Image: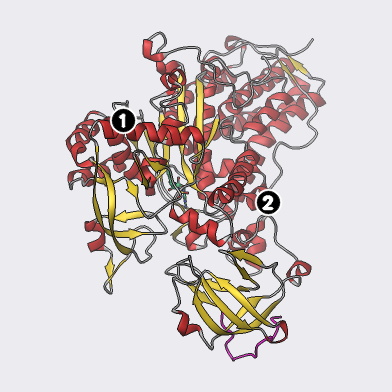
Amino acid sequence: MSAEKCCVSESVTPKIKPIFKYKDNVVDFESSKFYVTTPIYYVNAKPHLGHLYTTLLADISARWNKLKGKQVYFLTGLDEHGQKVAAAAESAGMTPQAFVDSMAPKFKDVWARYGFGYSKFIRTSDQEHKIAVTRLIELLLKNDQIYKSEYSGFYCQPCETFINPQEAKESEKDGKVLCPSCQRETKQISEESYFFRLSNYQDKLLEFYAQNPNWIEPKERLNEVISFVKSGLKDLSFSRKSVSWGIPFPGDPTHTVYVWGDALTNYISAIGYGQDPELFGIFWPADLHILGKDILRFHAVYWPAILMAAGLELPRRELVHGYIIMDNKKMSKSLGNVVDPNSLADWYGTEQVRYYLARNIPTTQDSQFALSDLEECVRADLANNLGNLLSRTITLAKNNGVDFLEGMALSELNSECADLLKSLSVELEDFRSNMDQGLFHIAIAGIFKQLSAANAIFQKFQPWTLAKTDSELFRQLIWTVLYALKSCATLLWPVIPSKVEDLLKSIGHELCLGKNLVDQNIKFFEKVNFELLDLSEPLFQRPVEHSKKAQETEKPATESVALNQGNDEQLIDISDLIKVKMAVGKIIEAAALVGSDKILKLKVDLGGFGLRQVLSGIAKHYNPTDLIGKSAIFVVNLKPRKILGQESQAMALCAVTKNGELELVIPEKGSIPGAQIS
Ligand code: MSP
């Protein structure tokens, strides 16, 4: 006899079939489709743990809705235009398009490794996106929602953000206006720009917030938005004349579309805005935008106003999470404190990292990242509470000749076993509401409380004795614990999908998406059979304690993880390092490189390595004449490369100051030209 099997699991990203139109009210949208998005990430750096976290929240939300039987569309992707990307491409000696093409796989590879089952990966350089942005702006121009004028104010180039006058006043320090989000110095600029009439939407937005008090989770964020809008909205600069890497502004190709008109539109261009009305009709409005608090204003003020101006419905909800913190600062590439998701996956496994982030980093607040917490989560919850319960139950059953258990009804069970399953059913209601609100950490804690209860009942009945004295009660107990494991595992599928699939297989089941598994399995107990397989290895190994190793070498626990950031994959060994030849060089000439405002052309005396021409991206940080006579450190065995027709024959080493400026690495005691670095 074999256990009842559910149908074969559906792939994580089922092909979206337009099987209904909620707009015709044929099917209530609540019970049919779910469209969830992440922000689209800037491509000037590879993904770090903060980006992983947001994308994980969206993956969990998408999978949770698949469990509920919904047709899910999960969108993520990249924000590829703008000055910052053009500058990064230039320093890499690439065209912007080649540069963004080289960055996209860095995100896709990490997302694939972590099992993120997105439906679409949008890139703002995609043709469909450019068409959608053009159509949207044409509509706004036609509706007189955009006009041409002059922009003048402070601008943060690294963040590509104009600073509003109030913020500029507050962040002024020693006569300099610092960017409120990255603390770097802003520049005053003045140029022609197209403006979106944001000021027209102040009252409409306030009315919308009042009517939809649950629109933003957590609620306090909505209050921040309301006070910002009440303080007065200014029209929004929607184009840039000085940035050429972007979408040409409709009707005026001397401008490109400014970042938010371009980036925010991804949420509608991805589902066919202006091009595929059928797909668009099915999925818009988005059911959930997930974002970090850094971009709240763009999503909760600008985006709804743009949608109102275009006559489109607003997203149904926004989940705004806090920051992952390292050393009391937001984890961010520019602050140099990022953790590489690949290193963590190598050390602990991807599902373990997924679990830690979902369980330990509350969606509602900022949280410190700590390796020791990650290890504790894996050890206590995954290896002990869940994994050990599974292996103990299977081993004990099999050792007592039980490979197969026929389904039992609640009424046939001993009262304590029945109570355990009933309390699971009660827990389900809290779980459902927490998951729907994006409070994943609370929902998961509830499931582990149930697993602890299953462990406790196992311990109390001492089934190893019971097997000899009361085989019927023994079977009831094993069946109950397996049922609890099956139910808890099903609910944990959004968080640790592949481990859950392994667990279910080991007890003769499979996950079958496409129907409401939540109610079916947990609320209305099924009389399911279990067929027990031999476990080849534990579901979760106890983690190696990398946090302790880090302490023994007197390094902060996460420093060694962050170490892997500089290169693509692994730490290098000494044989790699000696391949890089570095030497002291004395700068004897310095001038601006014609055609670039970022690069200086240097002539450098490198002693035995010769007199070389070096192109260095330090024009914004040094006056050429101040450099003459200075010694610095150069990599002398890099392949020469050409920038704007000129060859660079070595590379100057620079450090980044806390204000984000570059400074040359200078030998302290005046070593002579050609002195090698060892
Ligand atoms: N390109 C814009 C978003 C446009 S959306 C229409 C952007 N990109 S970003 O690369 O800077 O990514 C920002 C998002 O990454 C944040 O909103 C947040 O979701 C995530 N995070 C980046 N750093 C983070 C932490 N330290 N902690 C948690 N999330 C973080 O802004």
Residue 630, quarter of the rendered image? bottom right
Q: Quadrant of the C terminus?
A: bottom right
What is the secondary structure assignment of the residue under circle 1? helix
Point out the tag, 2 or 1, that comes first from the N-terminus.
1
Residue type marked 1? Leu
Label at residue 139: 1
Establish whether ligand 1 lies closer than 8 Å to the Cβ of label 2: no
Q: Nearer the viewer, residue 62 or 246?
A: 246
Disc 2 crowd rating (10 Å Cα; few below 14, some 14-19, many 20+) is some
Q: Residue at x 40, y 35 (%)?
A: 133
Horizontal arrangement in the rendering, residue 124 relative to residue 408 (left or right): left
Residues at discs 2 and 1 in contact (Cβ within 8 Å): no
Label at residue 519: none
Majority secondary structure in the magenta region: loop
Horizontal arrangement in the rendering, residue 45 relative to residue 378 (left or right): left
Residue identified by numbered label 2? 347
Is residue 671 on the magenta stretch? yes
The percent position of residue 606, horizontal first and vertical second, equals: 66, 84
Alpha carbons under labels 2 and 1: distance apart: 51 Å
The percent position of residue 557, horizontal first and vertical second, equals: 59, 61
Q: Residue at x 70, y 52 (%)?
A: 544
Residue 570, quarter of the rendered image? bottom right
Q: Quadrant of the N terminus?
A: top right
Is residue 580 on the magenta stretch? no
Res. 79 visible in picture: yes
Q: Nearer the viewer, mark 2 or mark 1?
A: 1
The percent position of residue 296, horizontal first and vertical second, equals: 35, 44
Identify the magenta region: 665-678
